[in-house]
Amino acid sequence: MSTADASSATNRGARLILIGPPGAGKGTQAVRLSEAFGVPAVSTGDIFRSNVKNETELGLQAKAYMDAGEYVPDSLTNAIVHDRLQEVDAAGGFLLDGYPRTTEQVHELDRLLEEDRTALDAVIQIVANPEEVVRRLLKRASEQDRADDTADVIRHRLALYEEQTAPLIDVYGSRGIVVTVDGLGSVDDVTERILGALRERGLQSERSVEDASNA
Ligand code: AMP
């Protein structure tokens, strides 16, 4: 069986979004949730970073924005998500990490889902206090050598999140699909909290947190 066959055979079709400030632990949770639900984790930040690393045309266009802690323009960002969600492994479901981040991106995602006659199952909001977030980001900066993790850029990224992205929670909240989870504590605790909150909404993962963390 090919990889695509294997994933569609186990795919329960969850369509999920993770929203939270930079440093809230979205990336770590995205990997685990994607395992738990058998859907691909799609991180726009990772896609941009790999394009920057490989010096593609997209990477060259995105780099200056990323280094400054600015959002990459919606036109570029929407185009990569459009392409990624058309890949076969995303046909039955996906977990978006770091997208949408602007109102225009919400509209684009709505359009894409309408075209496919599908809808989001849940928007997972990870809440983390700003001091903890800055501490985590500075630690990551020294570990991963990320140009967008200097103290000034971190402050800017947090401000941008508050201004442009936090309001999206109300947009999805009015649709009744937001699940809010405290991002403080161990990685396992947070995963367990998210899976518990999703279960309460009738979204059952096919694998437990132990399986997901051992994957
Ligand atoms: P992340 O790893 O999700 O924090 O993303 C790293 C950087 O990539 C962000 O600071 C932005 O410059 C860019 N980026 C990632 N996702 C988006 C998005 N949805 N819209 C605009 N820019 C994005």
Image: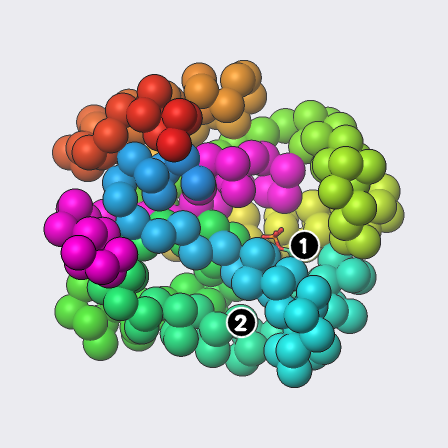
Q: Magenta stretch?
A: 1-30
Whether the magenta-drawn stretch holds residue 17 is answered as yes
Query: Where residue 69 sits: x, y (%)?
Result: 74, 58
Q: Quadrant of residue 116?
A: bottom left
**Is residue 177 visible to the viewer in this orientation of the structure?**
no
Q: Label 2: which residue? A: 77
Q: Label 1: which residue? A: 160
Foreground of the two, 123 or 96: 96
Decide: is 143 above or below 4. Answer: above
Q: CA distance from mark 2 to mark 1?
A: 16 Å
Identified by mark 2, the residue type is Thr
- Ligand 1 in which quarter: bottom right
Badge 2 element: helix
**Ligand 1 closer than 8 Å to label 1 CB:** yes
Whether the magenta-drawn stretch holds residue 166 is answered as no
Query: Where residue 176 sits: x, y (%)?
Result: 26, 44
Report the residue at 64% width, 38% height from top.
23
- Left or right: 111 with respect to 96? left
Label 2, residues with CA under 10 Å away: few <14, some 14-19, many ≥20: many
Report the residue at 29% width, 61% height from top.
90
